Amino acid sequence: MRLDRAMRPARLLALPLLLALQPAWALFEDDEARKAILDLRARVAQNDEAHKARIAELGSANAQLLEQIAALRRSLLDLNNQLELMRTDLARLRGTDEQTQRELAELQKRQKDLGQSIDERVRRLEPVRVSLDGREFNADPDERKAYDDAVALMRGGDFDKAAVALAAFQRRYPASGYADSARFWLGNAQYARRDYKEAIASFRSFAAAAPDHPRAPEALLALANSQAEMKDAKAARKTIEDLMKAYPKSEAAQAGKERLASLK
């Protein structure tokens, strides 16, 4: 207790000293703090400016990027439009190509058909080699057909139509290689239809025009028979005698000899 009282005056003396020293120490710390605060503020401001500059830089870069993206989008749209046009053109070209191929195929078919038709017509017009009654000659296809048709009528027993067809053939083809044979069959058709006067004229014309024809002996015998049918026995005998004299070894001459015995 006494000791505490003894120390009390010392405590009272130290207290003013502490109070005197406290403001200087506090002041010192305020300046440092203020300086630190100012430095911090400066750094904050500097960082803020740097951030703003960075933000501005990023904004500018972002704007450029957006512009580039927009340009790319426009380019892509243009390319899509061009691609669509190309697809349309390609489809049209394909359609045109298919149409062209169809037209070409049709044209080739028509050309082939036309070529075949022309070849057929040429074949019909080209002369053909004919062998008839031991003779060979050239004849037009139409000429050959006309003769064959007329003879077919004769052999079919239609003598009226055969006579008309053979007479028409002679008028149409007077210089034909078929002329002598046509004249021979015309005389036979006339004889078969009992037109003896016309038959006599046809057989005489044949014998005079083609004495070396293989059917000349037959023609003279038919002429004699036509004369006999006309009751002209004298002319018939004379014709048979000419036959036997000109073609003595022919079958017609032998038949004429037998026929001669019946003529009075």
Image (cartoon, grey):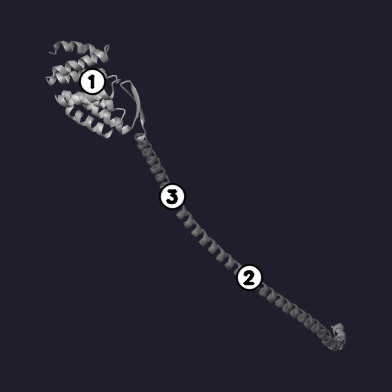
The image shows residue 7, relative to residue 164, as above or below, that is below
Classed neighbour count for the residue bearing mark 2: other residues with Cα under 10 Å, few (<14), some (14–19), many (≥20): few
The quadrant in which the C terminus is found is: top left
Camera-near label (3 vs 1) is 1
Q: Kindly report which numbered mark, 2 or 1, lies closer to the viewer in this rendering.
A: 1
Circle 3: residue type: Thr
Q: Above or below — where is 24 with respect to 247?
A: below
Check whether the beta carbons of the residues at disc 3 and disc 1 lie within 8 A of each other: no
Res 66 quadrant in image: bottom right
Q: Secondary structure at mark 1?
A: helix
Residue 156 seen from this side: no
Give the number of the mark in front: 3 or 2.
3
CA distance for labels 2 and 1: 120 Å
Q: Which residue is mark 3?
A: 100
- State the image coordinates of residue 93 (x, y, percent, origin top left): 47, 53
| Lower position in the chain sequence, tag 2 or tag 1 | 2
Dot 1 corresponds to which residue?
A: 219
Q: Which residue is mark 2?
A: 64
**Can the viewer see residue 89 in this picture?**
yes
Q: Residue at x 63, y 70 (%)?
A: 64
Question: For this rendering, which residue is in front, 203 or 48?
Answer: 203
Q: Residue at point 74% right, 78% down?
A: 46
Q: Report the residue at 40% width, 45% height from top.
A: 107
Helix or strand or loop: what does disc 2 sit on?
helix
Residue nearer the viewer, 194 or 47: 194
Q: Is 248 left, or right, of 25 in this rendering?
A: left
State the CA–CA distance, disc 3 to disc 2: 52 Å
| Quadrant of the snapshot with the N terminus | bottom right
Nearest to the observer: residue 212 or residue 51: 212
* Residue 49, picture quadrant: bottom right
